[in-house]
Image (cartoon, rainbow, N blue to C red):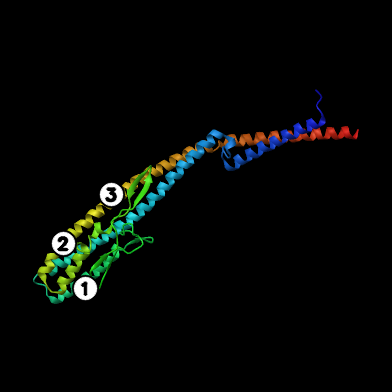
Amino acid sequence: MRVSQHILFESTYRELNRSIERLLSAQRKAASARRVLRPSDDPLAAQRILDLRASRDHVASAVRNGQYAQAWLSVTETALHGMEEVVMRAQELAMVQSSGTMDTSTREVAAQEVKQLYDQMVHLANTRFGDRYVFGGTQTQMPPVERDELYNPTFHANEQEIQIRVHGGLTLPLNVPLKRVLGDDSEGALVTLRDLIQALEADDPDAVAATLDDLDRDLDRILKVASEVGARINTYQRQQQSLEDMEVDLMETISEYQDADVARVFSDLVNQQTVYEAALRSTAMITRVNLMDFIQ
């Protein structure tokens, strides 16, 4: 079979183009230090990488949720500790002012301090994380509690919990509804503080003493919730550590499928460069021969 010059040229240029493509591929791999840049490089590995990336993205989302939850609960825990201090200070004042050795003037001064404690408790109850009220239940855009001029509280929070997804279908409660912490507008810490203010202003030591049992109950309620929040934080921290370890494992596995053996990549690059240069010399030689035939 006679091989024409046209066929020879076509074959030579095809080989030259293939050599260029292989060289460019080797250069891209060397520049990125990755073995699989396109699905065609290794279809099975490419599919495995896609699956692993999807798993990594899911775990990364769970990690972010866990970080958000821990930050929220940390703010909640700080507010609860502040509430504990308010109630304990109110207990101290009630105990001292229930004594017969105290008089009207000392109780008036104590009443003013308890009013400040009341407002501090309202401020803590209206604690926000970002633009959301942490004790509002699912009504996170409205202050959970307010008071009137007579220190009567009005609650706006509901008692619903916000659930947050952490991983694998597992959800955990994020918030603590305010009524679980302070009771409501008929019985609870704010009502007790209001009663203490009224008893001090009335200069009634027996009424002051009567608030001590209620303050004990209020403190126990806050301490119980604070303990639950602390346990939740510990749960999230353990879950977070597990997820972070999982994320690292997934990244390492992706790297095993995707990253190149650097020494091998650069060796291949040198080989492809050599092949390309040889193809160029061959093409140039054929071109010169054809020109000489044309001249002759």
Q: Position of residue 90 (x, y in %)?
A: 19, 65
Q: In the rendered image of this protein, does residue 233 appear above or below residue 55? A: below
Residue projecting furthest to the right: 296
How many marks the image carries: the answer is: 3
- Element marked by disc 3: helix
Q: Which residue is mark 1?
A: 112
Q: Which residue is mark 3?
A: 231
Type of residue at label 2? Asp
Q: Quadrant of residue 114?
A: bottom left
- Element marked by disc 2: helix
Type of residue at label 1? Gln
Type of residue at label 3? Ala
- The answer for how far apart the CA atoms under marks 3 and 1 are is 36 Å
Going from N to C along the chain, the mark reached first, 2 or 3, is 2
Q: Position of residue 230 (x, y in %)?
A: 28, 51
Q: Which residue is mark 2?
A: 214
User: In which quadrant is the N terminus drawn?
Assistant: top right
Q: In the rendered image of this protein, does residue 113 appear above or below residue 168? A: below
Asked whether 262 or 42 is in front, the reply is: 42
Tell me which residue sits at (13%, 70%) in the image. 97
